[in-house]
């Protein structure tokens, strides 16, 4: 049971300002308490045997004999010089740990920590040690096309926090950083303005490789500076021959299962890149503007049901945002279960066919009334034939299709199978032509006719088609339509859909298995699983061929006469072996006779090698990275514990990895997936050079551009405390907040280090059973804290770790424990049981807090560890394990005893708001029962200035009785309260009432410890007198 409530600190006792107290040691020589004036004789105390707790430890209880001037060996204590007289007898904090590190000193310190504590060798060390369990975090490869950015920092540091935590708690971490090295963006940047003109594939590849290697070197250096733990000499690269060979093995297994095939079908095509693109390579521009049109297709053969109504001269009304596709039209589709109307225009009597539910909106758009002259159900349109509006003699049928919707348009869809995925499905069902009239540059071909040939379909081609429709009287209405439209993810230019001969993966046949596998995967946040499932539904096939040079060649050969592809397990296995030995450049370097040797031809039952040409396409880079599980995870059947990437990978690496793994192994490549958000500016804006809001992580660490040098740990703290499941903001405010938080933490650690100076935990530690109860209680709180942070790290919630840490420091340490034990810590004899008890706890707290922050702040943690007592020279924190809390730290009754006292203390402090508790005597009256027994365990005597209960109350004196005295002074303040005791899981429950009486103390303040426990102002209290006497 925990008491929920404010643990108050009396005004004037600066308990929460741990660091600020160190330079003002004269004000902090002790906890302020006092000795009370005599009370009336106490009644007989309740005697109970077999208490819940052992009897309390007490401070020295001797009176003030010999503590005043003229008595014994004590010296007079003059008011003015008293502070200086006893300063050297007080055990103040001492440590060489610096309170602040800024600027160049901070940067040098972090780099020295990395070197001295073996950051570069830590990963290899933990791989070589024995461990019962392994934790595998598979690194999604960042793209090797530029400098490191804050998105990299968020991702890599987030992974490193989890890896360091797992390593600390004894697991063997498997983490191999990688880079995605192929693809168009690298090729474009490498070639710059030169383009590919006049360059051979090998020349293009060499330039692209050099560019990628430079980007990798810069990114790798940054990741190391951020403190990311890995063996940086053993990374994976998708252009490495061994990786490419593993990738081809996946390709071959999928091809053998019939999942990879070649076909002529519509794909997303980028005229700006001159290559096919997959869905994951698209960005949708929500502000794209199209010239949408309403156009008519005259019905030249009415459906039988319509003809029987005696209607004539009817035109089908269609709507499209892509007028350039009209020349490729092969049909007009209707919704089978919808109702359609033939309507007459009031302004010109033209008869139009459209969906009944779209009539009102179309009438408003045309600015005329539409009178219904006949209604028909979808199936009644079957058999209708239309005349193509711009191509003389061409006829197109009315066909049913399930993709027709009523959201916009007319409910009748112009269908061009060459330029739409749904349209292509209709063509496949009804054996329509899939004729393409658009070339690789996005221009009309000769097949479109002389008026359209060589015109760019997205610009002047669209203009011309609209002009042709207008000339033939088919254009009813034109309007601007702002809608979401796919763009090339790298060139930022719009794409088109056009058919071409490409290689595909039949993802439709993998969907059910992939969904089943995904249901067994833990996804964070939960909402991301729905997005992953939705993306699987959207992708019925995956185009994996690209018409570029920088990539892994598709290992296929084509017959020179028939064009038939030669590809099988024999050809692919041979090519994979060559790639492993020589790298994929050999596809262009070696003669075809080496690529396709006689023994392979024989096994393939193929003709002579002279009949074949090698293919020119390369694999989609999403297939490159999607096969990383096969190349990087050590065992063929292994599965990573976690994949951690940004939300853009929902349709990218998460999905490509899932599909390839399910295809080959019938299971997901991961046990859990963590999806984090993007980094944005503090205004929530996407980072852009044009907006000037880009934050460079190198500048964050080293300073510049109006930012101070924050160092790597502040950058890591920013990552840890961010809500990673939403957009993550960064800027001066966020970084300054992180810096301030780290500084506060540093000051707390300095306070802890200062107070364990000279303490040897191996020889001077006190057994927990012999400690003061408040110290035992602190160990109990430390154990709770360690369990909470362990759970938070395990849940990938570093933000919760920080919240738990800050609450523990501010509430349990600074405002509670530190404020109570300073007097004992500073003023008790150096080797006394009470002080050693306190130091034992402080050392445990220091160790626990330091280890708990280590995954987030490895530099600070190792720095603290170097200053902490009890370690061998050369020992480092990361090689010494996780928080070492003990189950014996939780004792029955202990929690209730201390928290019961805290409840009473809260009542006491609330009765003297804004006043110094140390100036008051406190009488606590509790009827005999459990609560009284618990308080007795903290104070055996009826009255005491030195008991553990007095220490907890922070008052001058505590009187413990079963009822309040009748002759209380007139200036007494009374208060009452109750405390619920809950022991043994609720078996023992007792709601106990208590009363308190508060009166100003008549005792004087001791000039050494500043407690109100002396007989007069020039007199040391008994405890201080004893300490000073022994010192002399």
Image (cartoon, rainbow, N blue to C red):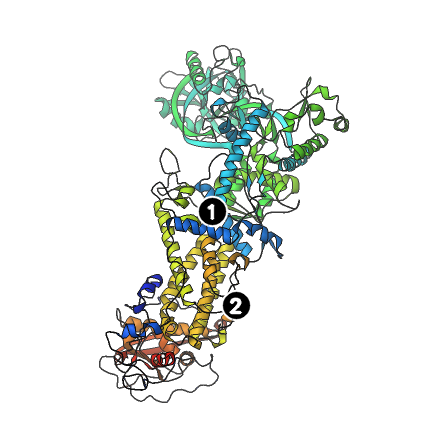
Mark 1 or 2 closer to N-term?
A: 1
In this view, 870 is above or below 659:
below
Q: Which mark is residue 226?
A: 1
In this view, 672 is above or below 219:
below
User: Residue 1001: horizontal and vertical position, in percent?
Assistant: 26, 79
- 202 left or right, relative to 861: right
In this view, 948 is above or below 19:
below
Q: Quadrant of residue 397?
A: top right
- Which residue occupies 40% across, 18% down? 476
Q: Which mark is residue 57?
A: none
Nearer to me, 95 or 196? 95
Q: Is residue 426 visible?
A: no
Nearer to me, 391 or 1027? 1027
Q: Quadrant of the N terminus?
A: bottom left
- 696 left or right, relative to 912: right
Q: Which residue appears farthest toward the front when viewing the image?
A: 1032
From mark 1 to mark 2, how far is it between C-alphas? Answer: 33 Å
Name the element at disc 2. loop
What residue would you read off at disc 2?
886
- 20 left or right, relative to 503: left
Q: Quadrant of the C terminus?
A: bottom left
Nearer to me, 88 or 487? 88
């Amino acid at each position: 049971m925990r008491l929920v409530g404010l643990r108050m600190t009396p005004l004037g006792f600066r308990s929460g300002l741990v660091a600020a107290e160190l330079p003002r040691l004269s004000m902090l020589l002790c906890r302020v308490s006092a000795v009370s004036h005599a009370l009336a004789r106490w009644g007989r105390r309740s005697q109970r045997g077999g208490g819940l707790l052992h009897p309390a430890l007490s401070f020295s209880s001797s009176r003030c004999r010999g503590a005043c001037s003229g008595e014994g060996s004590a010296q007079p204590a003059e008011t003015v010089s008293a502070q200086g007289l006893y300063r050297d007898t007080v055990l103040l904090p001492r440590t060489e740990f610096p309170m602040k590190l800024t600027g160049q000193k901070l940067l040098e310190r972090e780099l020295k920590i990395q070197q001295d504590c073996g950051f570069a060798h830590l990963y290899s060390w933990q791989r070589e040690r024995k461990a019962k369990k392994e934790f595998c975090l598979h690194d999604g490869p960042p793209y090797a096309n530029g400098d490191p950015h804050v998105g990299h920092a968020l991702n890599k540091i987030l992974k490193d926090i989890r890896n360091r935590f797992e390593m600390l708690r004894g697991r063997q971490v498997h983490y191999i950083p990688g880079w995605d090295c192929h693809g168009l963006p690298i090729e474009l940047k490498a070639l710059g303005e030169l383009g590919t003109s006049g360059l051979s594939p090998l020349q293009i590849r060499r330039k692209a490789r050099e560019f990628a290697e430079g980007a990798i070197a810069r990114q790798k250096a940054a990741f190391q500076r951020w403190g990311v733990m890995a063996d940086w000499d053993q990374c994976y690269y998708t252009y490495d021959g061994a990786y490419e060979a593993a990738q081809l093995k996946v390709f071959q297994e999928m091809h053998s299962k019939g999942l990879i095939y070649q076909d002529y079908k519509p794909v997303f095509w980028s005229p700006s890149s001159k290559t096919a693109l997959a869905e994951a390579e698209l960005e949708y521009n929500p502000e794209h503007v199209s010239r949408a049109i309403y156009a008519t297709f005259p019905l030249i053969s009415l459906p039988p049901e319509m003809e029987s109504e005696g209607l004539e001269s009817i035109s089908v009304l269609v709507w499209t945002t892509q007028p350039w596709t009209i020349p490729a039209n092969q049909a007009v589709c209707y919704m089978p279960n919808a109702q359609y109307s033939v309507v007459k225009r009031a302004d010109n009597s033209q008869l139009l066919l459209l969906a009944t539910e779209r009539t009102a909106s179309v009438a408003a758009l045309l600015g005329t009334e539409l009178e219904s002259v006949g209604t028909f159900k979808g199936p009644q349109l079957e058999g209708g034939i239309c005349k193509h509006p711009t191509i003389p003699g061409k006829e197109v049928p009315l066909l049913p299709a399930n993709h027709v919707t009523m959201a916009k348009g007319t409910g009748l869809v112009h269908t061009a199978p060459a330029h739409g995925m749904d349209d292509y499905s209709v063509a496949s069902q009804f054996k329509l032509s899939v004729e393409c009239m658009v070339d690789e540059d996005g221009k009309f071909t000769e097949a479109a006719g002389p008026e359209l040939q060589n015109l760019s379909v997205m610009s002047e081609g669209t203009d011309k088609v609209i002009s042709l429709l207008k000339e033939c009287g088919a254009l009813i209405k034109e309007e601007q339509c702002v809608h979401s439209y796919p763009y090339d993810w790298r060139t930022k230019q719009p794409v088109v859909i056009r058919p071409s001969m490409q290689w595909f993966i039949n993802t439709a046949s993998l969907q059910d298995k992939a969904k089943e596998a995904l249901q067994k995967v833990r996804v964070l946040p939960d909402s991301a699983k729905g997005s992953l499932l939705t993306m699987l539904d959207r992708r019925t096939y995956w185009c994996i061929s690209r018409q570029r040079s920088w990539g892994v060649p598709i290992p296929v050969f084509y017959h020179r006469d028939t064009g038939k592809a030669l590809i099988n397990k024999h050809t692919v296995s041979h090519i994979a072996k060559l790639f492993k030995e020589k790298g994929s450049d050999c596809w262009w370097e070696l003669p075809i006779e080496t690529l396709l040797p006689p023994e392979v031809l024989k096994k393939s039952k193929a003709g002579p090698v002279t009949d074949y040409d090698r293919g020119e396409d390369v694999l989609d880079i999403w297939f490159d990275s999607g096969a990383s599980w096969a190349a990087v995870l050590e065992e063929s059947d292994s599965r990573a514990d976690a994949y951690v990437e940004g939300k853009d990978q929902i349709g990218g690496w998460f999905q490509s990895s899932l599909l390839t793994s399910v295809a080959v192994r019938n299971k997901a490549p991961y046990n859990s997936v963590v999806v984090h958000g993007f980094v944005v500016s503090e205004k929530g804006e996407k980072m852009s050079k044009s907006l000037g809001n880009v934050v460079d992580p190198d500048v964050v660490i080293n300073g510049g551009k109006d930012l101070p040098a924050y160092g790597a740990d502040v950058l890591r703290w920013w990552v840890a405390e961010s809500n990673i499941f939403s957009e993550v903001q960064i800027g001066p405010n966020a970084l300054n907040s992180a810096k301030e938080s780290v500084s506060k933490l540093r000051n707390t650690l300095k306070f802890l280090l200062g107070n364990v100076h000279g303490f040897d935990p191996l020889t001077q530690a006190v057994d927990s059973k012999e400690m003061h109860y408040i110290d035992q209680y602190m160990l109990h709180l430390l154990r709770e804290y360690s369990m909470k942070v362990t759970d938070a790290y395990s849940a990938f919630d570093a933000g919760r770790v920080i919240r738990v840490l800050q609450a523990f420091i501010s509430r349990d340490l600074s405002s509670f424990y530190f404020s109570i034990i300073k007097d004992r810590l500073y003023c008790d004899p150096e080797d006394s049981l009470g002080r050693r008890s306190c130091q034992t706890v402080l050392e445990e707290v220091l160790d626990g807090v330091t280890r708990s922050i280590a995954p987030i702040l490895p530099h600070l943690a190792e720095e603290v560890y170097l200053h902490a007592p009890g370690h061998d020279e050369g020992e480092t924190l990361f090689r010494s394990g996780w928080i070492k809390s003990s189950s014996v730290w939780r004792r029955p009754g202990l929690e209730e005893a201390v928290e019961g006292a805290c409840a009473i203390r809260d009542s006491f402090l609330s009765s003297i708001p804004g006043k110094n508790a140390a100036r008051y005597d406190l009488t606590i009256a509790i009827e005999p029962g459990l609560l009284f027994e618990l308080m007795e365990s903290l104070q055996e005597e009826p009255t005491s200035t030195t008991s553990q209960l007095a220490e907890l109350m922070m008052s001058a004196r505590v009187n413990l009785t079963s009822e309040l005295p009748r002759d209380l002074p007139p200036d007494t303040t009374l208060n009452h309260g109750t405390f619920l005791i809950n022991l043994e899981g609720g078996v023992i429950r007792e709601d106990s009432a208590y009363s308190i009486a508060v009166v100003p103390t008549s005792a004087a303040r001791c000039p050494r410890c500043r407690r109100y426990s002396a007989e007069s102002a020039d007199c040391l209290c008994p405890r201080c007198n004893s300490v000073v006497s022994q010192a002399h």
